Image (cartoon, rainbow, N blue to C red):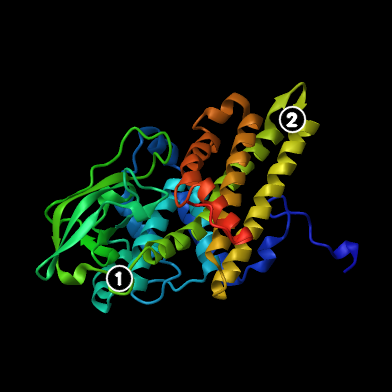
Amino acid sequence: MSAGRLPRFDAGDPLGIDDLLSDEDLAVRDTVRSWAADRVLPHIAQWYENGELPVIRELARELGAIGALGMPLSGYGCAGASAVQYGLACLELEAADSGIRSLVSVQGSLAMYAIHRFGSAEQKERWLPGMAAGEVIGCFGLTEPDHGSDPAGMRTYAKRDGSDWVLTGRKMWITNGSVAGVAVVWARTDDGIRGFVVPTREPGFSAPEIRHKWSLRASVTSELVMDDVRLPADAVLPEVTGLRGPLSCLSHARYGIVWGAMGAARSSFESALEYAKTREQFGRPIGGFQLTQAKLADMAVELHKGILLAHHLGRRMDAGRLRPEQVSFGKLNNVREAIEICRTARTILGANGISLEYPVMRHATNLESVLTYEGTVEMHQLVLGKALTGLDAFR
């Protein structure tokens, strides 16, 4: 190709990653981007400042209507989308706010995925269509007040009582918990760790909302309290025993974070770039100064490397070749780099960077939660360390 026929340089897509996407991929991305621009961006600063997501049920139904809930799952009203398309949706949702992407991730990649992969035919028929439509919100109970990175130490316990199960325990930091109609709860039993599909209206179940957060403020976060919740025999997920169940769900959710974190980073980068081109100091735009350009260049490099990494992992997932260690690779790198992009963007915006008139500080504080949920930095480092050396450093 001659130099005269080269495509123009696109500051929004400097590596030409869009060339790797199909028309269907682009249509999915544009649909979610348009929805977020219309339904989230005009209100998100106020929701964040108020520490609430007052229209969560309405948003869930709208997300269901555009096929964003349980996107990669097939049947039961799910879209059956590719992993790359799901990732693109996560990127656009988190470019609006991490709390919105968390709503979708927990609904689809944790609660729905657990039922779809490990549930009985009856459980799937009962719950998945309503969840795909956003009529029923789900949550996922694994983390406990004293057991986060080590879920094998969980204290929540389910014991048999005749043909029933009786579930007792607490779960902590549960997204969607207070508005959920169904909870997938993991508990110890005499036969090992099992998953239970728990209707949240059962006697003994409560989900008080966690307040006073300085991160993920536009997200419903709750404690789950189970005080002798009696469940029928068919409440247990029949197709899995042990930590393989919840960990496989977490791997699926972490994949969405690999993409989503780049959405928060992109939003912050775009704000800094536009600000640098219009904010004047010493008689000219600050984007014309070498130090500002160096910051913008470094941010762009890490942002689009991260998107390219996410795309690569998505293609591997679509081919059935994505390993959990590779998901850890992506989650570790992309969230860490996204936070650095937000912090650098804040320096370009100066004092304006701390204002909710711009998205940068909101994204930065949200990513502090994303950094440690679905596996802390240290846990993902040790996952990779074990894969590289063959030596287990967890214990």
Q: Which residue is mark 2?
A: 285
Q: Nearer the viewer, residue 137 or 247?
A: 247
Q: Secondary structure at mark 2?
A: strand
Residue 95's x, y, as percent? 53, 48
Badge 2 amino acid:
Pro
Residue carrying label 1: 129
Q: Amino acid at mark 1?
A: Pro
Nearest the viewer among 144 and 3 is 144
Q: Earlier in the sequence, mark 2 or mark 1?
A: 1
Please tell me how crowded label 1 is: few (under 14), some (14-19), or many (20+) other residues with Cα within 10 Å: some
Instruction: Tell me if mark 2 has few (under 14), some (14-19) or many (20+) residues whose alpha carbon lies within 10 angstroms of its own.
Output: some
Q: Residue furthest left?
A: 162
**Residue at disc 1, secondary structure:** helix
Which residue is at 83% across, 62% downward? 6
Q: Percent x, y for residue 55?
A: 32, 47
Q: Is residue 260 left or right of residue 389?
A: left
Q: Which quarter of the rendering shows the N terminus?
A: bottom right
Q: Residue at x 39, y 48 (%)?
A: 148
Q: Position of residue 154 (x, y in %)?
A: 31, 52
The structure residue drawn at horizontal position 22% and vertical position 61%, both measured from the top left corner, is 198
- Which residue lies most toward the top here? 282
Q: Is residue 184 visible?
A: no
